[in-house]
């Protein structure tokens, strides 16, 4: 088990290091390429199997992929530059749109980093609410993966089933945060609003519905011969390569390396709940599928424990400088009005310094690095998007495989382009 | 692992967040400081590659993140230890040692006039895309990088967007109430 | 939605073939074609960002675009009638957006889904095209970040109505490009029916 092949630079590498202009020239002049058997094929960015706007340049010989290059940037939104214009209270609206399948994780990482710089601690109830919302978001993100993975491989019905369960979770999110996606709910200081009455019944209903349906997926996919043929042995990665390529999340765990930030470097209250860290054996696409399917079950297990253990108390820190006052008090107190005004227009000032905080998102380690100069907007905000870094493994996974396997591999890496391009 | 050198203590820096250890602790030849609980190593361009090789050999098996900061418009004190001259750019690397669970941040100063830094590709190939992004956004070139080209912006784009002298590019917006709303 | 009104023939005068029961033989061919076009506008896959997730949710079982003949999202623009630009369009993506639009065959319509596609949204910066109407002519603007499936469906129905009664051509002439109809958000206004509960 060695990482030697990911260190190669030349033509023997899996990565096609060719610029887009050069590739276009080869495309326009067929005589330019000396090797007649090799074809440069462009896949995307507008393609049903590329999971968003990912473009792949594939160097192929027949149906076999030799080298490849993922070309990104088609969804570059300038979010890191935009973050320098937005206050820390508005910052969550920005980062939440990066990983749009699991927005609460980006909000959480941003909030944790801001709180680290502010030196504040959020109340217990806020911590557990955050954990509840994040685990439900993990479930909905993995259900999205199951839906798209199924459809990419031909199980078109899976698209409908995955979305059916996802709707249940999104309905709960709408009940709590007001929005189905891009919630801006987890903010520095706690969460935006308390859980509404009747949330326990809603969550139990979601868990009771999802449990038997996951068993349906096992019947539809896990044991099915076609599914296994298409995924087992496809896109194999070993631990040394994954570590060398900075891969994290299910990609790293599928190689057999049990690294999950929730267990290894717990944040929120993950050391107070019981759950298993799932690892694969072969590092192939089937392992990644199985890990994500079972992570849904582990998340459900965590949510059940949160239902029992949810503490009472404040849902956000009672620090007047950071937390806006309750709306009712604005009519009663001049000070409350001024605080509200200052927090929402100028924003609160964060002390000088720099900090990095990471959480375990459904795709891997999601970290936020903030440099503050003492003003109310970040001087520099950088998001370590797991999809961006995991994409580097793709040429190595696809090498010497068929192009049909390429679709399975893209799907199993599960990139979200908003996080890749930011 | 860390070498304690008996050098005289620095003049105390006054910000609360960045607080260099009073006995000037060093690791891999770089000065250590603490930033709200994070371990930060400060490097000048000359010491950088050697220190990173030492860190890699010492068990930092994964590079978590690599980014840059443009300190051109930074209004607060930089808080760098003595012996590290402040430059316009900093390349910031987050490393992790899975066995010990330790995380370390390395900040290297890169000059604004001719921004070049050594590439870490041979130590941690996962830095390839991250260094391309830093080149794209800041214009910092990485020596000996296998593919030093833009990754997010179009290939023929002019300028480096995350630099502080590059405007956000917002257009003035006038709110117009739409007259034909259904 | 059209329901035939028994004993009342004003619907034929107003809606052409809307009074289908009454008027199949004597309605004119143009009405027939518009009737068909409206009931099978096949969208092209142009999901870019978060709005694409909501667009997929609209095509899924709960909101179900199949009942309007639209569940087949065609990968090839040659086979598509409707381009729903779902998401933010970056500088790198704009030429591709135009290329896909040009490859679609007439008649074609464009729905700009979400605020990023309609106006640049919250991203007023160097990277995002401030409104896809700078690149392609837009017929319906659907606001929201992201617009929920109900809003997207309201946008689609608006477009459908305009296709059927040919008002879309009138609006396009007036506007000198796309029809430019702005709709209002309809999210969260349906009764919360639950599946299985």
Image (cartoon, helix red, strand yellow):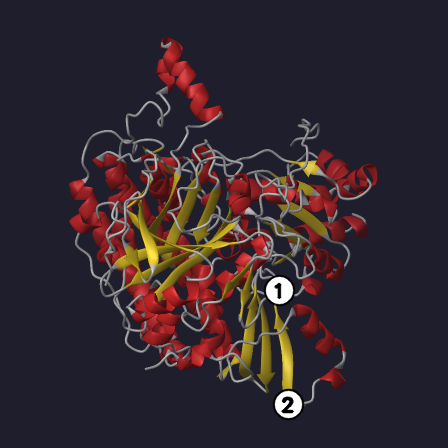
What residue is shown with label 1? C75
Q: Nearer the viewer, residue B131 or A71?
A: B131
User: Which residue shows up at 71% across the image and 41% down it?
Assistant: C162
The answer to whether any part of residue C37 appears in the image is yes
The location of residue B84, given as percent across then percent down, is: 42, 51
Q: Nearer the viewer, residue A238 or A141?
A: A238
What residue is shown with label 2? A37
- Circle 1 packing at 10 Å, graded few (<14), some (14-19), many (20+), is some
Label 1 SS:
loop
User: In which quarter of the view is residue C104 placed?
Assistant: bottom right
User: In which quarter of the view is residue A373 placed?
Assistant: top left
Query: How far separated are the C-alphas under marks 1 and 2?
Result: 28 Å
Is C42 located above or below residue B69 in the figure? below
Label 2 SS:
loop
The answer to whether any part of residue A150 appears in the image is no
- Circle 2 packing at 10 Å, graded few (<14), some (14-19), many (20+), is few
Q: Nearer the viewer, residue B50 or A102?
A: B50
The location of residue A297, given as percent across then percent down, is: 26, 58
Q: Chain of mark 2?
A: A
Q: Nearer the viewer, residue A156 or A117?
A: A117
The location of residue C17, given as percent across then percent down, is: 73, 45
In this view, the mark in front (1 or 2)? 2
Tell whether A389 sits left or right of A314.
right
User: Which residue shows up at 59% across the image and 60% down it?
Assistant: C73
The location of residue A350, given as percent across then percent down, is: 39, 33
């Amino acid at each position: 088990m060695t990482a030697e092949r990911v260190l190669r630079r030349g033509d023997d590498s899996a990565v096609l290091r060719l610029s887009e202009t050069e590739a276009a020239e080869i495309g326009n002049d067929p005589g330019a390429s000396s090797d007649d058997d090799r074809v440069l094929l462009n896949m995307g960015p507008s393609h049903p199997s590329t999971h968003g706007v990912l473009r792949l340049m594939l160097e192929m010989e027949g149906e076999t992929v030799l080298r490849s290059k993922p070309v990104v940037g088609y969804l570059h939104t300038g979010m890191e530059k935009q973050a320098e214009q937005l206050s820390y209270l508005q910052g969550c609206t920005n980062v939440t749109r990066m990983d749009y399948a699991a927005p609460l994780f980006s909000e959480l990482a941003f909030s944790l980093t801001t709180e680290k710089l502010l030196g504040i601690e959020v109340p217990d109830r806020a911590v557990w609410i955050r954990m509840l919302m994040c685990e439900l978001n993990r479930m909905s993100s993995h259900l999205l993966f199951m839906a798209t993975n199924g459809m990419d491989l031909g199980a078109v019905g899976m698209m409908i089933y995955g979305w059916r369960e996802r709707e249940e979770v999104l309905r709960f999110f709408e009940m709590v945060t007001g929005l189905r996606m891009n919630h801006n709910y987890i903010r520095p200081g706690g969460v935006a609003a308390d859980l509404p009455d009747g949330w326990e019944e809603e969550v139990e209903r979601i868990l009771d519905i999802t449990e038997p349906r996951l068993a349906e997926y096992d019947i539809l996919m896990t044991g099915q011969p076609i599914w296994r043929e298409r995924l087992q042995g496809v896109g194999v990665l070993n631990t040394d390569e994954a570590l060398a390529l900075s891969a994290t999340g299910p990609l790293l765990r599928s190689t057999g390396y049990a690294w999950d930030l929730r267990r290894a470097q717990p944040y929120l209250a993950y050391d107070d709940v019981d759950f298993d860290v799932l690892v694969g054996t072969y590092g192939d696409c089937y392992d990644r599928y199985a890990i994500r399917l079972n992570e849904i079950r582990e998340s459900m297990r965590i949510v059940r424990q949160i239902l029992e253990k949810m503490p009472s108390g404040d849902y956000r820190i009672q620090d007047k400088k950071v937390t806006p006052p309750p709306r009712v008090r604005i009519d009663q107190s001049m000070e409350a009005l001024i605080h509200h005004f200052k927090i929402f227009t100028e924003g609160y000032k964060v002390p000088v310094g720099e900090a990095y905080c990471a959480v375990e998102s459904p795709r891997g380690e999601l970290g936020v690095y903030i440099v503050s100069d003492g003003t109310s907007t970040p001087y520099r905000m950088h998001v370590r998007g797991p999809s961006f870094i995991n994409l580097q493994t793709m040429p190595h996974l696809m090498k010497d495989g068929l192009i049909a396997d390429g679709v399975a591999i893209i799907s199993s890496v599960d990139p979200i382009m908003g996080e890749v391009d930011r | 692992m860390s070498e304690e050198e008996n050098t005289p203590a620095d003049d105390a820096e006054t910000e609360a967040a960045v607080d260099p250890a009073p006995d000037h602790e060093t690791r891999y030849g770089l000065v250590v400081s603490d930033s709200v609980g994070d371990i930060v190593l400060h490097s000048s361009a000359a010491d950088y590659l050697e220190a990173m090789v030492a860190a890699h050999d010492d068990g930092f098996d994964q590079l978590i993140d690599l980014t840059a900061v443009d300190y051109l418009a930074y209004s607060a004190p930089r808080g760098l230890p003595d012996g590290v001259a402040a430059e316009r750019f900093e390349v910031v690397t987050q490393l992790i040692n899975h066995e010990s669970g330790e995380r370390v941040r390395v900040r290297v100063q890169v000059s604004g006039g001719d921004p070049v830094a050594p590439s870490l590709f041979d130590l941690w190939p996962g830095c390839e895309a991250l260094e391309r992004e830093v080149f794209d956004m800041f214009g910092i070139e990485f020596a000996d990088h296998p593919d030093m080209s833009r990754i997010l912006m179009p290939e023929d784009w002019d300028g480096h967007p995350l630099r502080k002298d590059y405007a956000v590019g917002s257009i003035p917006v006038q709110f117009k109430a739409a007259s034909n709303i259904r | 939605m059209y329901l035939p009104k028994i004993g009342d023939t004003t619907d034929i005068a107003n809606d052409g073939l809307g009074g289908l029961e009454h008027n199949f033989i004597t309605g004119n061919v143009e009405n027939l074609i518009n009737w068909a076009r409206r009931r099978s506008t096949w969208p092209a896959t142009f999901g870019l960002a978060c709005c694409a997730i909501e667009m997929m949710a609209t095509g899924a079982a709960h909101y179900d675009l199949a009942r309007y003949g639209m569940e087949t999202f065609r990968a090839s623009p040659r086979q598509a009638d409707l381009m729903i630009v779902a998401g933010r369009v970056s500088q790198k993506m704009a030429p591709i957006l135009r290329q896909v639009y040009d490859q679609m065959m007439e008649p074609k319509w464009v729905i700009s889904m979400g605020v990023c596609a309609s106006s640049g949204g919250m991203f007023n910066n160097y990277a995002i095209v401030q409104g896809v109407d700078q690149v392609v002519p837009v017929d319906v603007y659907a606001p929201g970040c992201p617009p929920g499936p109900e809003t997207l469906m309201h946008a689609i129905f608006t477009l459908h109505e305009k296709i059927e009664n040919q008002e879309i051509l009138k609006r396009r002439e007036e506007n000198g490009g796309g029809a430019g109809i702005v709709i209002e958000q309809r999210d969260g206004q349906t009764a919360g029916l639950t599946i299985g509960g």
